[in-house]
Image: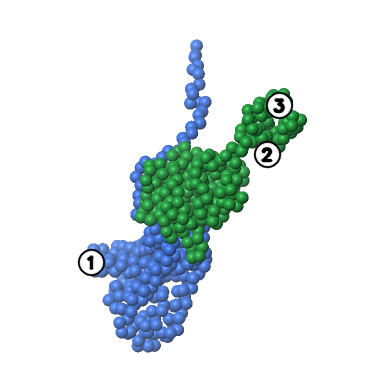
Chain colours: A green, B blue
Amino acid sequence: MVETSLLHLDEVTKRYGSVTALDSLSADVPLGRIGVVGANGAGKTTLFRILLGLARPTSGSVEVRGMSVAADPIGVRSHLGYMPEHECLPLDQTAADIVGTFGEIGGLPARAARQRASDVLDLVGLDEARFRPIGGFSTGMRQRAKLAQALVGDPELVLLDEPTAGLDPAGREEMLSLVARLGTFGISVLMATHLLDDVQQVCDHVLMIDAGRLVVSGPTEALLERTGVVTVDVGGIPAAERLISELAVLGVVAEMVDGAVEMPVEGDDDLDLLRDVIAKLDLPLYRLGSRLTSLDDVFMQRSGHG
Amino acid sequence: MTTTSPPSASAAGAVYDRGYRPYEGPRGGRRAATFALYRASIRRALGIRRSWRQKVAPFTLLAIVTVPAIVNVGIAYVTRDEIGERVQIITYREYVGVSSALLVFVAITAPDILCPDRRQRVLPLLFARPLTGVDYVAAKVGALFSILFAFSFLPQVVLFVGQALVSNSALDYTRNHADVLWKVPVSVALLAAFYSVLGAAISSLTSRRIVAGASFIGLFLVSSITAGVLVGDVEEKATGSAAALINVLGLPLFLRDLVFLGHIDPESRLKGVENGGLYAVVAYTVALAIGILVLLRRYRWMER
């Protein structure tokens, strides 16, 4: 087992009667932030249950950080943190009490658990609310409290099941920002989600699952391809419309996408033309970059749904 | 001329981003996790770290079950100079009985420490820790047992110490009642084990506390009434009936009598039944075993 391998899945299959939840999954997943992507019912939660030792695979084997889940599920769980998708915190207890208690149940001495609870609640932005009952928390606060209880034991790997579920756009950005930071703390993340944008934003490696089968496994960046289209942000819709009109006069077809301008380029001449038009119109240039395929495109293509 | 020094940097304030600090201290395994869950369950049952309302039931119960002991000691004190046998309203054996307060306490507490874990879907978080189903059951039943034992044993301690102090000689009293020093804890343990296992088993079958509590009380009432109907009026009969074992409420009390008297109480519904004591032990054990099996089945931590 290589030192940098987080997960080793070897022909993992899980059947519930006639239903195959996972079908011969094999992958070597490195340390880092990994996105497990698939539609509802694709097998993401089943995979998590198998990693936690809460479900036994019908066939195949799983290793987490070199430890066999079948041989030592308790030992594996000692190194994991888990944030379920559903509501799961006692509503009549305070955040500090819950996170501290879960820290103790995770094996930390009582005093250390209370200190760790305070630290992780501070990390997730709940330091001022830690003595309030969970029942009074907003959805975003509850998600952060769930993340805190997953981190209190200082896990090597944290399993996040749909961490942005139910969050508004601002809450989603905050949660993704927190998840991204975990990687800098040396904590690997396995994030299950059906939102490809979340994975594209945060994860270094992607596992795509469709109907229990592994569609693709690889570094996020490698999966994304350059499309021959550039995206230009000139500071808003009015400026973008001016740019598009001017390009049209020169015979270049450009379109507006989400307030930015997308224009096909074949070489440096096209880029020079774009630069000159922007300078002529005296527009600010905030961003210029190649438009990549989205993970949506990759998923649709590889799973055969596209 | 005075000189002023410039304000120090600390007076201007500072923001520290402590970042994330890894934990490098000791870690416990299953045993530590189980004990932590046990402690958390006791705190919940006694309302510790919860609002004052959650403390009312347990401490009211403790007061209620301690009252007979206080009254007994008080009467003994008042009549200490009278010639003849002191008035005693309750014996140690009778005190190891099932009071309504104790049943109500189990009906409230067992669901309170089990049902929310299922209703609020906390179980996946618990079983994502180094904890098995057996550990979970041991922690929860252990917590219930500890509280029931303490709440049943403490009044006995009050009674014994009080009686010893109001007697002519505390040393003589202790010597004359030395058997009580083991009979009471053993009988109380048998009672506490029985009600903690059955209370937990019934609570494990539902996620709703009120259903669990009502079911617990209902089981005992129905079985008690059924046994009463089947056995009939024992006072008018020379012999009781094995049907008395249907009364789940009474099973620990038969064992209590075996501990204190060495035989079934001649005034109980099981009086005169051949091998009645053995049947009582078997029935108690079977009921306990069924309760434990239900618990282990309900808290299978790994699906099959």
Amino acid type assigned to the residue bearing label 1 in the image: Arg
Q: Residue at x 30, y 67 (%)?
A: B186
As helix, strand or loop, the secondary structure at mark 1 comes to helix
Amino acid type assigned to the residue bearing label 3 in the image: Val
Residue, disc 3: A277
Is residue A141 in view? yes
x, y percentage for residue A251? Answer: 74, 32
Find out whether the residues at labels 3 and 1 contact each other: C-beta distance under 8 Å. no
Q: Nearer the viewer, residue A264 or A120?
A: A264
As helix, strand or loop, the secondary structure at mark 3 comes to helix
Q: Nearer the viewer, residue A185 or B136?
A: A185
Q: CA distance from mark 2 to mark 1?
A: 91 Å
Q: Against B14, is A71 above or below?
A: below
Residue, disc 2: A258
Q: Please give the chain letter of the residue carrying mark 1.
A: B
Q: Are marks 3 and 1 on the same chain?
A: no
Q: Residue at x 38, y 73 (%)?
A: B287
Q: CA distance from mark 2 to mark 3?
A: 21 Å
Q: Please give the chain letter of the residue carrying mark 2.
A: A
Amino acid type assigned to the residue bearing label 2 in the image: Asp
